[in-house]
Amino acid sequence: MTALILALLAGAVIGLALGGLGGGGSVLAVPALIYLLHFTPAEATTAGLIIVSVTSVTALTGHARDGNVAWRTGLLFALAGIVPATIAGAAAGRLPESLLIVAFAGTAALAALRMLRSARSEPSGRVRPGKAGAAGAGLGAVTGFLGVGGGFLAVPALVGVLGLTMRRAVGTSLLVITVNSLAALAARAGTGTQPHWAVIAPFTAAAILGAWDGKRLSKRIRSATLRTVFAYVLLAVAVFMLADALT
């Protein structure tokens, strides 16, 4: 199977999850780039940030049109993560590849567990500013270090810490992801990693189309069901990556 077809298929799946769940799909972008398209971990994390940034902006416009973005809350949450995202983005390119893969496997497992937990939880309605700031900073660091959007952290935090409904949390998380991804990309600009546009461009285009389909799908299927299915896929990916890194 050619690299172009693999890029299109992987992009469509990731966009579907990102549009339907507001996060989680980007966690699959880096493994797909490494194992299907043979990027190095450093190249994959940079490419992942490009794909996530463009796809998130596209998905964000649809959610904004439907009134599902809490702009002030999202921007404040994102601001807490800009500095950590920038620092982590600059440091990531200087770390051993095996360490990046192990860290990514752990992050994918955490994403799956958080998604399973949030699938069964309800909004608390209580706003805790300290926890919101800590969650925003942590999300920025994860985004910069591993090249993922971090929606799997943003959505539960926006629901449980800031009291948003699940639908508004999904839309708002896309705003947070966009800001953090762009900050991390800016930090990586001087690391010397050259994006492979022949793969990244079709991958991103397929992800954009998948995001629109995911948004429509989220209106027909319970988000808890989508989240549970995707969480088990992420767990399988995490186990595979960890086994690969340790053998």
Image (tube, grey):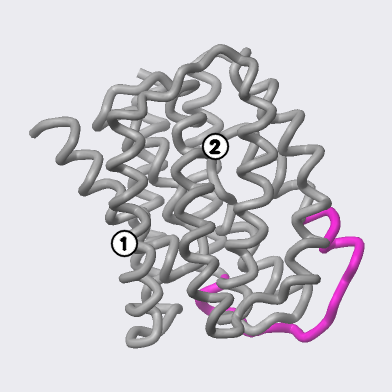
Q: Which residues are magenta?
A: 118-135
**Above or below: residue 143 compared with residue 95:** below
The quadrant in which residue 152 appears is: bottom right
As for residue 128 lying within the magenta part, the answer is yes
Looking at the image, which residue is at 41% across and 22% down? Answer: 245
The quadrant in which residue 243 appears is: top left
Looking at the image, which residue is at 74% across and 33% down? Answer: 86
The quadrant in which residue 202 appears is: top left
Query: Which residue in the rendered view is the most extreme toward the right?
Result: 130
Residue bearing mark 1: 210
- Please, what is the three-letter code of the amino acid marked with disc 1? Gly
Badge nearest the viewer, 1 or 2: 1
Say left or right for 233 vs 184. left
Looking at the image, which residue is at 31% across and 61% down? Answer: 209
Query: Which residue in the rendered view is the most extreme toward the left?
Result: 1
The front one of 57 and 98 is 57
**Above or below: residue 36 compared with residue 223:** above
Q: Quadrant of the N terminus?
A: top left
Q: Which label was assigned to residue 147?
A: 2
Number of marks in the rendered image: 2
Q: Which label was assigned to residue 237?
A: none
As for residue 153 lying within the magenta part, the answer is no
Looking at the image, which residue is at 15% across and 40% down? Answer: 5
**Above or below: residue 9 compared with residue 155:** above
For marks 1 and 2, give the CA distance: 20 Å
- Please, what is the three-letter code of the amino acid marked with disc 2? Gly
**Above or below: residue 86 compared with residue 168:** above
Task: Give the x, y percent position of residue 129.
Answer: 90, 67
Task: Give the x, y percent position of residue 64.
Answer: 58, 76
Mark 1 is surrounded, within 10 Å at the Cα level, by few (under 14), some (14 to 19) or many (20 or more) other residues, namely many
Say left or right for 88 vs 54. right
Task: Give the x, y percent position of residue 186.
Answer: 66, 31
